[in-house]
Image (cartoon, rainbow, N blue to C red):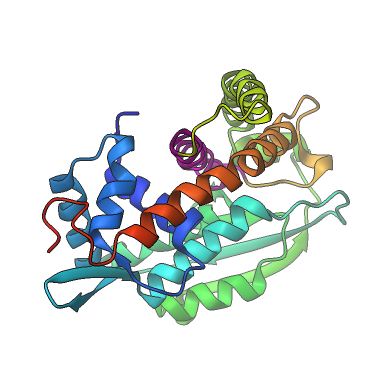
């Protein structure tokens, strides 16, 4: 598997395999784990250094060896991502209310404006234009946390309201989100991974799937699927298209992930246990 986005792969490795492990991870272990995904030792070291410089990771020295652990901001980021992937906001019923977020941020703070837009998209908000974003979810507490984190309390207003005119709900949704495009991506995900899931299930039942392959497949699966929470607003069922494939894709992802989990964890456990202090990876510094 050739790595196209080294930082994303490292985030996925920490988020799905290392997030709940208390000990820092030896750099040699990270190099070993990422090698099957096409990342060279030099690339891993470079990206780890950059992530530490950005404040996502921190380094700990033990003699000549370097270890990495998540910083508090890095951990919060991955915990939010974990919740969004494995426990997204799904509402079978909807009372017809919308959350409205409006902002006015001066041009000299435009970088904060871009960061706010990314956060709003992450929450599933859609833009109506002119600094007005909407979502059917009640996100008041989440917006307060974002406002505090970005120091934007003086620049934001949040409302909970009902739509009374002039578009219907379908037109409003189409204006804010490209659900057709998202659905095509879900369908492609299902077509691509359904046969792989069946093949892996048969191989595991026959005890013919190596733990290393299970690890590579699981990391690649999560790395691909983690993009959906960035684009899917997780609209309540009454606002979804009639042939929506999001739930089917989620069910496949969860089943495939659970199928690969024991063998993949076994591979990671073995790598982490053998690594500290061992000369198994060239360049143990």
Looking at the picture, tell me which residue is in the foreground, 283 or 119. Answer: 283
Magenta span includes 81: no
Residue located 59% across and 40% down the image:
260
Instruction: Determine whether 252 is above or below 110 in the image.
Output: above
Q: Does residue 124 appear in the picture of this structure?
A: no
Q: Quadrant of the N terminus?
A: top left
Q: Magenta part of the protein: which range?
A: 212-232
Instruction: Determine whether 31 is above or below 39 in the image.
Output: below
In the rendered image, residue 215, in percent from the top left (x then y), is placed at 47, 41
Tell me if 263 is positioned left or right of 251 in this view. Answer: left
Which of the 4 quarters of the picture holds residue 51?
A: bottom left
Looking at the picture, tell me which residue is in the foreground, 253 or 33. Answer: 33
Instruction: Determine whether 186 is above or below 212 in the image.
Output: above
Q: Does residue 142 appear in the picture of this structure?
A: yes
In the rendered image, residue 32, in percent from the top left (x then y), is placed at 28, 48
In the rendered image, residue 262, in percent from the top left (x then y), is placed at 60, 47
Instruction: Determine whether 56 is above or below 145 in the image.
Output: above
Q: Quadrant of the C terminus?
A: bottom left
Look at the magenta stretch and give its main secondary structure. Answer: helix
Magenta span includes 224: yes
Residue located 54% across and 39% down the image:
225
In the rendered image, residue 119, in percent from the top left (x then y), is placed at 48, 60
Tell me if 128 is positioned left or right of 95 in this view. Answer: left
């Amino acid at each position: 598997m050739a790595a196209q986005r080294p930082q994303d792969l490292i985030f996925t490795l920490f988020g799905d395999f290392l997030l709940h492990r208390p000990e820092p991870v030896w750099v040699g272990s990270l190099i070993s784990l990422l090698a099957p995904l096409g990342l060279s030792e030099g690339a891993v070291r470079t990206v780890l250094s950059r992530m530490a410089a950005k404040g996502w990771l921190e380094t700990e020295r033990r003699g000549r060896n370097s270890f990495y652990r998540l910083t508090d901001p890095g951990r919060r980021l991955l915990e939010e991502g974990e919740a969004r992937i494995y426990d997204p906001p799904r509402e079978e019923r909807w009372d017809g209310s919308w959350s409205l977020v409006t902002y006015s941020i001066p041009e000299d703070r435009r970088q904060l404006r871009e960061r706010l837009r990314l956060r709003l998209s992450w929450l599933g908000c859609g833009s109506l234009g002119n600094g007005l974003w909407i979502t059917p979810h009640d996100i008041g507490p989440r917006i307060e946390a974002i406002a505090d984190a970005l120091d934007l309390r003086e620049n934001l207003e949040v409302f909970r309201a009902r739509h009374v005119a002039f578009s219907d709900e379908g037109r409003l949704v189409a204006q804010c989100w490209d659900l057709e495009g998202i659905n095509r991506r879900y369908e492609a995900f299902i077509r691509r991974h359904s046969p792989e899931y069946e093949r892996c299930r048969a191989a595991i039942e026959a005890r013919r799937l190596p733990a290393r392959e299970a690890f590579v497949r699981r990391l690649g699966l999560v790395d691909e699927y983690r993009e959906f929470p960035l684009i899917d607003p997780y609209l309540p069922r009454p606002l979804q298209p009639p042939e929506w494939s999001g739930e089917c894709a989620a069910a496949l992802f969860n089943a495939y992930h659970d199928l690969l989990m024991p063998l993949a964890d076994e591979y990671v456990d073995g790598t982490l246990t053998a690594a500290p202090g061992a000369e198994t990876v060239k360049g143990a510094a």
